[in-house]
Amino acid sequence: ALLAHIPGKAIWIPDHTHTHRASRESLKMEPLADVAMLPGEERVIDKDIIYICPFNAAVKGKVFITNYRLYFKNTDSTPVTLDVPLGVISRIEKMGGASSRGENSYGLEITCKDMRNLRFALKQEGHSRRDIFEILFKYAFPLSHGMQLFAFLSQEKYEENGWNVYEAMEEYRRQGLPSSEWRVTFINKNYELCDTYPTILVVPYKATEEDLRRVATFRSRCRIPVLSWFHKENHAVIMRCSQPLVGMSGKRNKDDERYLDLIREANGTTKLTIYDARPNVNAVANKATGGGYEGDDAYQNAELVFLDIHNIHVMRESLKKLKDIVYPNVEESHWLSSLESTHWLEHIKLVLSGAIQVADKVSSGSSVVVHCSDGWDRTAQLTSLAMLMLDSFYRTLRGFQVLLEKEWISFGHKFASRIGHGDKNHADQDRSPIFLQFIDCILQNNVRVKTASLWSFVNSDTSLYINPFYTSESSRVLYPVASMRHLELWVTYYIRWNPRIQHQQQSPVEQRYKELLALRDQYLKKLEELQLSDSTHLTNSSTPNAATPNQHITHLQTPF
Amino acid sequence: MLSLGSGGAKSTKPSFVSYVTPEEIKAEKDPPKKEKHPDLLPGEVEFCSANPILKYSQDDLSQHGVFGTLFCTNFRVTFISDETPQEKTAKTFKNKLYGEKNDIPLMCVDHIYGVYDEKRKLITGGLVKNKYPSKMIIHCKDLRVFQFCLTFTKEEDAKKIFQGIAHHCLEEKSLKCVFAFSYMGTPSPGTDLSFCREMLRKQETIMFDSPEDWTQEMKRTKANCRLVIENKNFELSQRLPKYFVIPLAIGDLFSYQGKGLPIWCWSHYSGCALFKASFPPVTQEDGDFQKHLETMINAVAHNYLYSVKTEDLSESLPNIQDIQQSYNKFKQFFLIENSTDFWLSDVKWFSSLESSGWLDIIRQCLQKAVEVVECLEKDNTNVLITEEEGTDLCCVISSLAQIMLDPYYRTLMGFQSLVQKEWVAGCHAFLDRCNHLHQKDKECHSPVFLLFLECVWQLVQQHSPAFQFSETYLTVLSDSVHVPIFSTFLFNSAHHREGVMKAESPLAQSGPLSCPTVWDWSVQFDSKAQNFFYNPLYSEKVKHEKAVRKPHKPKHQRQLSLPSTAFKTPLKKGFFKDETDSLKKMLQVKRLSRWMGSPDSPAATTREFYESWQHRPVDYHGLLLPCLDGPAVRVWMQRYLRWIPEVYILGGGSVAMTTKLMELLSQVQDLKRVLEQRDTSQAAKIDHRPYIQHRLLSFGSSGRLSSSFPFAYTRNRSFKPIIPTGLMQRLMVTDSLASQEDEASSVASFV
């Protein structure tokens, strides 16, 4: 589990090179063409190559490969550069053979995890691609070659230790825990109870450590129901766990049943609601492999609701279809029906509406238990989305980081296998865009940068999410509208490689707002100065005719 | 709120039967009924009324509703609730003429359905005999849906109100019956300040009903054309404006009743210009007329460098019936009667949207406009767009091209002037196209003007900072078409307007008849509400750049900035150059094939044009082109979703954001004013701090506006979310993936 954390952390590095570059200008760096390298980054190979750009024609240039990135720069007139962190590469293939005919038919094809494919052509003579292919293959998939990920090689020094963003105790204390009904347990401090759970867990006060151990035997991978979020006013809770091990024979476990009842009792909920994220049929099918769901007769004081969210494999295929319609060219004539046929937005709608149901239940005072099969994919999506709706703290930049650390990293979302860091096995069944889907669900932009803004998913309540618009309304519950009418494709993520779709660095709304805020501050300051000078004039009253300092209103970009 | 029986509440599908008899209802309610009457507008007359009528509340699956009285007047159908109105919610965007909750202007009624024994039937003029339905469903042109239950009232009253509404809303009537001719509203003086501003605003909209307006416009665009005043009394043609502008080279005006006469629309700074003309299809035998057309094309070519490109819009764009059909399909997705329907249609939303073809028509129009812009801007060729009547798609394309090319038309006043120039003075047949009089002839109805507004919305959406007006302005304008008070949208042509107005005036007792124009927004909204028309994102042009239209864009410089690929295309075939002999041949070629572009498809060439434009830095006061890719052309959310409770965003959506911006903007303006005052007059040494403090404090504490009209503030913090129903039935995942286990392999480990 610990290992899974570290690659999980590493996923941020690829995405943020651009923003880092600016801040690091002061440091001395070996120049790579015109890009500063990261500390610890080393050049491996340079080569003349042709990039077959899907939007222009073939571009002649030079490719540089380091232990961190693939960088391409044109040598002919068309200005094209590529800066691809190797971690983004999912698959490298040879294209054509030494005897292939046709222009640019011999080369490499690289499939990326960020919705694009890159094709390079090389000279056919003298096995010119052999060395570059081997090197790229080695460095793009270091773990498959007994090497370390760049995250461990990086010598970057950060001002702040990012590992300290999330302090479990502090976060539980913020929520108002422990309380008379809920206690903190250290039973998992050596990952003995469950190796995919964090060390600090919050459980019902009345449940003993022995109870927990017994419940663990009945939950898949020992992921017992533990507290995720606590409603300060009505004391309802969100619990997360994995499926019960019911199996074909319909096993029961008295301890598990009693444990769930303790959760229910904690705030006097009449009926505990168990949200099973899966479709009903899948939950039934899971019985064959020893899993299953909480049956009516065994859990009398609970109601079970299936949220019909599909598994990682369905999601992965859906995203693949989406990629097909947006890269390299955006499907033109039947855009809408093609989009519909990917089901991507439909999956998002299901996740969102599941989260709405969870949030609604909790805010009406009932405690809920959320699980899927193992409780680390769909469950994490649902609990964290519901928490975003319920708790405005998570809508702040800091709070959002805490949420990710808590619900995703500490509770064992398998970042490493879902994203496949450094792994050459591109067809791995375990890969799935679950985290991307979650992020799509909230359309977050850029978690590390100060100017970051959290876009709400459906544009609903955008004003609350955009950083400059954020107002703290702590008690407010936000519900998005989970209708296809409001769902949109996140164009700036999925279609960002297409030069024809406009990419505004900053939304005009945000820009304008910041402009105005700055203007207001400027005017206020000026006014303050004037008032001050007035009052000094009045007290001195020696020079009544002295003109106020000749203040000119500077002409601004946006006059009114 | 009264709930009706258990019948409706239990079943998921709403049934139209009510299990409560009128007697029961009467017994429940004490009869101390005060006679309630609507506040009538000046000139408004009540026709009939009925009580009690149950108006179903829209946001409920079960059969809940409010009892009240239904009235029909010469202006509207209106419902007045028996319940004493609850505390008034702060309405920030109230229409002064009618309320969105209970009033339906007669002209705004689209269809009426009657429910007879649970069967829904479309009511047409002929069907109104004796039988009245138990339930009446009214679909409005602004996409509101009303449902009234008629079974609680006395039979004769029910019959009367049903027949009255059906008669006044559906049957063919004469123009004189339109409320505008009875309306005695005097322009409300309003509060002094807003009134002044109003007058100012009004003055700035150029009406294009005088020679001066046209001369002024020619001067503004530096056009070198000829103003025609010979049609002052419509001697030349009744389908042409009173005054219009034509190429200098046209000598003979009076042949073919002005048919084929190229009407000037706009001149590019290079000298080339855009013209439009009515071009009936040329039959082979009619050699004379063909010759006439050639002369006309020649005249256009003479305007600048002897170049012309003609485009027959009726060949390359959908015709007005296609537009009508597509819109009819499209609007059905928004005329939602209950939640079940909503969530059912939600599943197939994208494909049904596509099947209506409406977004595609919008795309085609924008595409065509970009092609025209490319000719003017890049090739500096004169363009003549033609169409049989010359007043439908010609208006759409020429107005769109002008908005893309000329930043003046992206201001509120400029936009209104453009609508006046191309549409109102330009003789778009509003009366026929909007079907204000419920004529039997269905051929001529078509939402062409709405299509234009839709296209403009796409531009506004994509390039907000370039527009002074907001999405809300466009929505309100699209609604105003169906408010029977404004002269703007009531006539088929300038000739028609003048004829009617002249004939009407002696009848009116109080002097000459004067209907307000729609641009007099104070008739509908107070000045506070009018603030919503302005886009706070608009980046106004900095003053000192004002007079630099020409030097601002030296042609050669601009071309240098284009990537070289943009110039590899050969000269376009439709581009005539000093070849009078080939004109005729070309004209025939033109008629045979579509738009003559380079060998590539038009889409491909305009894409190149778009890309080269996109590579340049954004200039919101320069050329503006729309992106036409699939994801870029979108549904006008505000207009279409504002009445559907399932998709209300409480305290959110774009309006909430816009208002926050507006608040901040007005604060900054206040501060600036204070500072300026201090600068100019030494006397003003009042301490403004308390006031400013107050303003700052109030900032952000106000409620949030909601996405639904009329943008009521949400003070109510607890609300139930809307949870979609019927989610899974449709999502069929056919492959075996769905049944797979989440974890195919054991926990992956990296050691």
Image (tube, coloured by chain):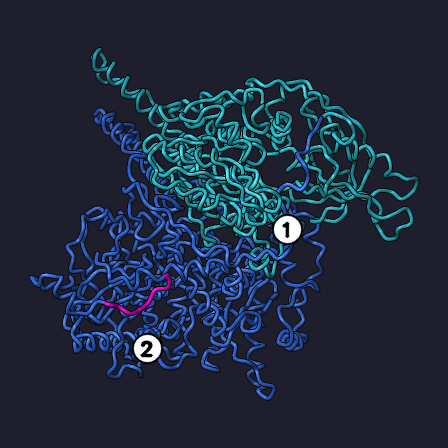
Q: Which chain is blue?
A: B
- Can you see residue B614? no
Quadrant into which the C terminus of chain A falls: top left
Q: From the viewer's perspective, is A518 left or right of A224?
A: left
Q: Amino acid at mark 1?
A: Leu
Question: Between residues A219 and B634, which one lies in front from this camera angle?
Answer: A219
Q: Chain of mark 1?
A: B
Question: Between residues A30 and B561, which one lies in front from this camera angle?
Answer: A30
Asked if B382 appears above or below A129 in the picture, the reply is below
First in residue order: circle 1 vs circle 2: 2
Q: Amino acid at mark 2?
A: Ile
Quadrant into which the N terminus of chain A falls: top right
Give the Cα distance between marks 1 and 2.
Answer: 50 Å
Q: Which residues are magenta?
A: B12-19
Q: From the viewer's perspective, is A304 left or right of A497?
A: left
Q: Which label was assigned to residue B123?
A: 2
Q: Chain of mark 2?
A: B
Q: Which chain is cyan?
A: A
Q: Are marks 1 and 2 on the same chain?
A: yes
Q: Position of residue B716 (x, y in %)?
A: 28, 42
Q: Which label was assigned to residue B737?
A: 1
Which residue sits furthest bottom? B285
- Can you see residue B457? yes
Magenta region's main secondary structure? Answer: loop
Please report the residue visible at 91 percent of the width from the left and 49 percent of the height from the top: A99
Say which element carries label 2.
strand
